[in-house]
Amino acid sequence: MKKKLMIGILATTFLMAACGNSEANTKEESKSGSKALVVSTFGLSEDIVKKDIIAPFEKANDAKVTLEVGNSADRYTKLLNNPNAGIDVIELAQANATQGNKEELFEKITEKEVPNIKELTSGATEVYESGAGIPIAVNSIGIVYDKEKVGKEITSWDDLWSSDLKGKISVPDISTTAGPLMLYVASDHAGVDITTDKGKAAFEAMKELKPNVVKTYSKSSDLANMFQSGEIEVAVVADFAVDIIQGASKEATYVVPKSGTYANFNTINVPKNAKNKELAYAFVNERISEASQKIKAVSLNEGPTNSKVTLDEKQAENKTYGEVADRAKTVDFSFINDNLSNWVDQWNRTMNQ
């Protein structure tokens, strides 16, 4: 069990916020006459979530929703340690949701309970069928760089290994959601399918890349500061953080190589011990509806997982949508989780020494 808990903690995300305890509020809200629902979710942009997602649902369903917010790994570990924590719905990063499915924490949801499942994109459907839950948002990795300082265009992942980028790059730490995706890129550079050698070729490629890497990063805010100070000129980044970087450095250009990218999905699940499952299913169904997905794609800068959502050129900027989504490959987070402890050790020896 200790190993399983460590995997849950390591597979963390960029999205950090203080955890809250909502049990007292839940009891009070149940007495008010409204149907009560406790939703465990990410802490980022909580005000927008309440306005664009929670408030419309409460009004339409005569419900009172209490949010428990925090980073994905902490909230997952809390549910794992106490399945009776009173959570009706939980939104997690794909890695944590995959582990939760392995631990049999969640209900098996079908179109009968959540009809909008049929509207999921092909990539989201693939993740849903893997058992990781129902995808509510998708992001992927790309390259952000200062074209003027670099002095040339960067168009491919292989460009990162160019000797003229020595001491100019930052890459996501292995402990972040994007970290394992970076290993997939490195394995591709080595010409090896990462699932065939469990990352051996990927780490050899990372050794070759190390002279170009100034430091790894765990928070997008740290990455933005490094760009702003001129400490780095190039970085591998998840698309949801691009706006933060461009806000700090107006010269930053974002590119997703034509060869493709790798995607991470945030998913939603209903714990087996949820007390309000009927209302929870209604919430999940609304969460992946065309209307809700369109609203949050714009206000929360999230790639939609409902295939009916259409975004104009401006709305689609820096998102896993359209042509970018078409070339974004899904990854097997069961494979990642099984190898993560070993990868963390190798990463620290290779990149952090």
Image (cartoon, rainbow, N blue to C red):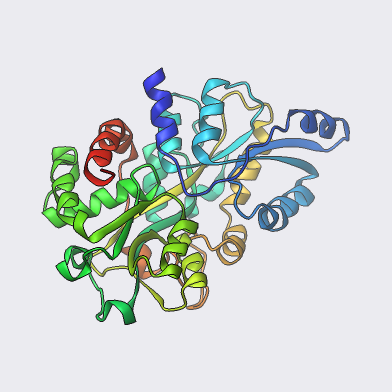
Compared across the picture, whether 93 is left or right of 170 comes to right
Q: Which residue shows up at 78% across the image and 42% down it? A: 63
Camera-nearest residue between 124 and 9: 9
Residue 6: horizontal and vertical position, in percent?
40, 27
Question: Considering depth in this image, is 128 or 9 the residue closer to the camera?
Answer: 9
Tell me how many marks there are.
0
Q: Residue at x 30, y 31 (%)?
A: 341
In the current view of this chain or complex, which residue is farthest to the right? 32
Location of the C terminus (image quadrant) = top left
Q: Residue 90 versus residue 289: which sits nearer the camera?
A: 90
Q: Quadrant of residue 211?
A: bottom left
What residue is at 61 percent from the left and 64 percent from the top? 299
Q: Quadrant of residue 252?
A: bottom left
What residue lies at 25% left-to-right and 70% top-to-bottom? 258
Viewport quadrant of the N terminus: top left
- Up-down: is 38 above or below 261? above
Q: Is residue 20 left or right of residue 147?
A: right
